[in-house]
Structure formats: structure tokens, C-alpha cells
Amino acid sequence: MPPLMVDFVSADTVTVNYNPAIGGFPCCEITQYDLFINSTSGNQSFINYPPETALTFSASPNSAYQVSVRARNSEGPGEYSPELEVNTKPGPVGPPTQVSSTSVSISFEWEPLMQGDFVIPNYVASISPYASGDGRLFVPRGTNATFANLEPNRQYAVTVQAGAVAGLGAKSAGSVVFMHTAPSSPPPPVSSTASPPTTSMITFERSCAEFRGCLEITRYRIEWVQVGGNQSDSGSEMIDTDPDLCEFTYHISGLRVNTFYSITIAAGNAYGLGPSSDPVEICTNPAVPDPPLVQFHHQQQAIIVEWEPPIVGGGVQITMYKIAWSSAADSGHKRVTVTNSNHTAAINGLLPVTTYEVTVQTINGHGISSPSTTGTVTTGSGIVCSEKPSIKLTAEDVARFGAVAGDQIVVSSREIKHQAAVNQLMSQCKIPAPAGSGAEFHFNLTDCEPLVGFAVDKFDGVDNTSLLYTYTIQLARFSVLSNVVQRFDPRVSFDFHCVFNRSLSVVSNNVHPYIIKDFVAMDPDHGQFDITLDFFTSDHYNTSLVGSPPTVEVLTFVFAQLSLGVNTSNIVLQAQYCWATPSSSPEDSVSYPIIVDGCPADNTYDEPGAILVTRNYQPNTAQFQFKAFVWVNIPDKGQTMFVHCNTMLCDRIVHRLQHT
């Protein structure tokens, strides 16, 4: 029997054909053909009569069939031909579903196809129309795909076919789905120009592109940023526009003078903003600078001028400042080149006790600024440094102290901190504070206890050792808190120095500190304890005050700590009472309470917070602090402070031990 051949295969039909068999004549002619079809779904038999040599039978999609044929005559059937293996194609895939889209892409997915004898190994997705290529995507073992390089806002037909052993499956009308790409944002506008700028404004002109992303342009965003520098000057503006208006003009104002700006613009439609255009760089014009911010300070026959460069320098480098001064009897001006990083200048050679009006102007290559705010400054009187110095204070000098009736102005070697120190000064070193007038001092070098040291002046490479006298002029006003303590009420003070070409040798004997250690002897049944009292520079209690004895400034805090000589958690250290006296005797009649019954003393004349107890009734240490003061009616050199404490040690279990 001749072999079978496949004539046509689809998802649901198969057509096979064969050549006629040769039989004997006339008795043995072929009367029929028997076809046998075997598959996983069952066997089928068909009879074909001559001259039919082809057979079409129904089949299942994506399935395998074995077909054989034999001829029959009057003598009976012949042998079956060799089996022909026939595989049907897959059926149609269900319609795909759109997942997302952009202006240039569509993403979609579909349900996997499950049928027949074979696993579907791949799918082929098709799209129409397609600008480049055949519009087909091969998707191995997947159920989703994305078509790219599409046109915005356009409809596309998308189908999916299954691929199997017999080839691609069929398409059905229901498997075609129409999908849309999204609209696009418009491209950047074109034909940009920037009109000639002013010192603070740029006029910006734009026209849009022909293609608008399939939607009408309804807005523009303009952005500008300073080029170079710290780029701190920037901004943006969103502008709504008529969809039919393509060209427009915008004024960017409030810009820095003589500064480059980079300007871009983006068009927007209902879909969103498009990309920004290429930047346009343009520079605003330079300008005359603003005047500087100025402060003035007087000296005896000079005025010190200090200034801050103007915020708006005109955009051109500032080259100098012009300082002008005038009075009824003396006027002048000078220019200061910008080589002084401190931005200061001195007007020397002025008349003493003379009121001047002073202004400063800024100069750059574009011009000179208007004058700064006028400063009215009065020069002071001269201080004559001789063996009998003479000091003259103007009414302005006195006013700087804020003096009122009852105050005193004093000259001394150091800042006065209590009334007793004022009482010790000689009469020529102190005068009542006059109201609305000046003051004069005339005294010998040593009357007002000057501090004497060495001043080394270096001129022309030669060292000259001189004798230096330092004086402080201040307002003496004190807050009398009680009949025991007082604190200095600080006010303005200033120093001056007298230098003489003399030599001075100072010899100081060695200072030997005298250290007292408290030793507490307890009942032998209760043990022995060392308790120390130390003073520190801060509430960290890690840096001790230095000196023998140490010194502290009035109004600063004294930080004190009581420490147990052993480190144990069984003993509680209690500071019951602490007080200060001007002598080493704890029984001194003059005293200042610090701790009473373990708590800060309530001194009615103290301001809140003058005494703090930060640690007490704890193992090993007790800590407290109080604001320093001076004793009333005790000379400056006799101002000493002794701190005493009564402490109690308590055994957490049984015993109570007391130490004074």
C-alpha cells in the first residue's frame, strides 16, 4: 500500500491523501479503502470507495494522530500502510487584556492556553499597524508582553497566537483587541530669545513646537537659576495660556545685577509637562553699588570706621570706599582701597571734643553709591600719661556708663567688685557721676593701684622694654543683698595704658600651699572614713579649680563636691549643713548659709538659682553649687571664703555616723 501524505492540518480538521492501489483485472479490482485513525481521545475507522483517495476527519486542537490505510478487493483486505503521524495546530488564545500604556508603548497580558496532548511552549503577539518591523513579538513560556516604539494617542489591534508542534494556532475574531497608547507631553518650545536685560529683569520670548503631543498646550513652566557662584538665586513660574496662543513673552524680575542666569521652559498639556528646552544663558546689567552698613567708634582725636560691604555690590568688583567727615571747624575725606579684609579705617588728626558727621560711600567700576547713614561722633578728650596722669571724660563718655545720681566713677588697677574696694581708693581716684557733663581725674601714678608689667614694643627690629601702667575706668554700683554679702552690678568700663621707658624687676617668693585633710575617727566598731571637699570649674566636676588657694570671679558659680574616701554602696553620704565664712573658723559670726537640712538655703536676698544642690543623700559623693560673692566691709585684699560642711554617714542597714 502506498504511504499516506498530509494534505491539510488545522486546529480541528486533518486531510490526508494517498495514491490508488494496483489490483488484478477483472476479478480483483480494488473495491474500497479502509482508514484507521488512532489518538489519545479514541480510535476511528473510515471506508473510502474508489476512486476517492483523500480523507478529511475532525480532530482536537494541539493533539497527535496516527493514520494508516489498506486496500480491499474481492479476495479480501490487504496490509495496512505504515502509520502517518499527524499533529494538529493549537486553538485560538483568549483575547488579551491591556495592563498599561505610555505615549510610546502598550503592555498587555493573556490567559495561558491549556489543551491537547502538548504543552504550549510559546506565544506570538501581533500588533497592527506597526511603523517598523513585522509587528510580532515571540514570547517563550510567558503570558505578557509590551510593544514599544509606538505613536502617541493611537489605536492598535493586538492578537495573541499559541505556538506548538504543528505551528501557530488560529486567530479568531474574538481574540483581536483594540488598545490605545497614551497622549504624550508636548516637546520643548523652540525659537527662544531673550531681550536685552536691565540690572534686575530679563524679558523672555518663546514659540511652541508644531507637534503638541496630541493634546492642546494649556500651560508653560519657566525656570531660571544663577550660573556659577552658590546658585542661591533661582525661581520658577507656571503660566496658564490660551491653547490657541503659541507665542508669548514673560518678564523675569527681581534678579541680581551683573549675574548670569540659565533659563529653560517646558510646555504642558492635560497629560503633563514635557521636557525642558535647551537653556538660554543671559547676564543682567551691572549697576552702581548700594552704600555699606557702617558703625563708628570715637577715640581721643580719631574716629574708627567699621563697615560691612553692601548686599548689592552692583555686580562689579568693589574697588574702594570713600569716607567723608565734617564739622564746623574741620572737614575732609579720603578713599580707602579694598585691601583691608577687616573693612575698617581710622580718621586721625581730628580735633578733640569735637562733633563730626561721617558718611561712607561704595565705589565700583560702574560708579559711586549714595552716602551711608550719617554717623554723628564726638571725639574724646586726651589722656595725658605722665607721672601725674590727667584724664578728661566728655559728657558722652559719662553717658556711656548709664550713670545716675548717687553713682560713682572710679579709676583703679582692676575692675571693682564690691563697695569696700571703692572705700579703699584714694579720693582723687573716684568722683560722683555728674549728670549731663564731663569728669576729670588727676592723680599720681600709684594712687589708684595700677597694675605694673612689661610692654615690649618692636620697631625697626629693636626691642625696647618699657614700664606699663594699666588703669580701668568704670561705674561703681553694687547690689547690697544683705548686711553680710553683696554682688557687683556690672556696667560699661574701659581700660587705658601708660607706657614709660623704664625697667622694673619683680621678685616673687615661692608660694607653698597649705593643705588640710579632714580625718574622721569613728567608733572602732564602725570603721574610719576620709571625707574631702573639692572645688571644680563646672558642673561636670572633672576639672579642679587651680591656685593655692584657688580664686573665683564674682557672679560665677562655685562647684563643690564632698567625697567619701572609699567607694561603697553601703554607706550614704549626707551633706546636712554647709555655710561660708570670711575666716577659717566655722563659728565666725559672719556667715552665708548654703545648705540647710540637706536642701539649698533660703536666703531671701538671693535671686532664684543662686544656690543649687545637685546631688545629696547618695553613696560616695554630694555636690552643690552657689554663685560667688564678696563680703561687705572687708578690704579687697582680705576677701577670702571658707566653706564648711556638717556631714552624716548612714549605714543602709543599721548604723548612723555623724561627722562635722
Image: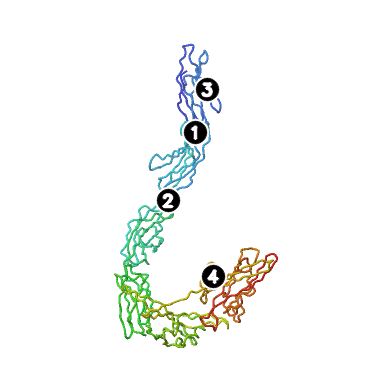
Residue beneath label 1, please?
90
Residue beneath label 3, please?
36
- In the image, 551 versus 224, the foreground residue is 551
Q: Residues within 10 Å of mark 3 (few under 14, many from 20)?
A: some
Alpha carbon separation for disc pair 3 and 2: 59 Å
Alpha carbon separation for disc pair 1 and 2: 37 Å
- In the image, 586 versus 187, the foreground residue is 586
Could you tell me which quadrant the C terminus lies in? bottom right
- Within the image, what quadrant is residue 246 found in? bottom left
Contact (Cβ within 8 Å) of mark 3 with mark 2: no
The location of residue 375, given as percent across then percent down, is 37, 79
Alpha carbon separation for disc pair 2 and 4: 76 Å
Residue beneath label 2, please?
183
Counting residues from the start of the chain, the first of labels 3 and 1 encountered is: 3
The location of residue 180, given as percent across then percent down, is 45, 47
Counting residues from the start of the chain, the first of labels 4 and 3 encountered is: 3
Residue beneath label 4, please?
536
The mark found on residue 157 in the picture is none
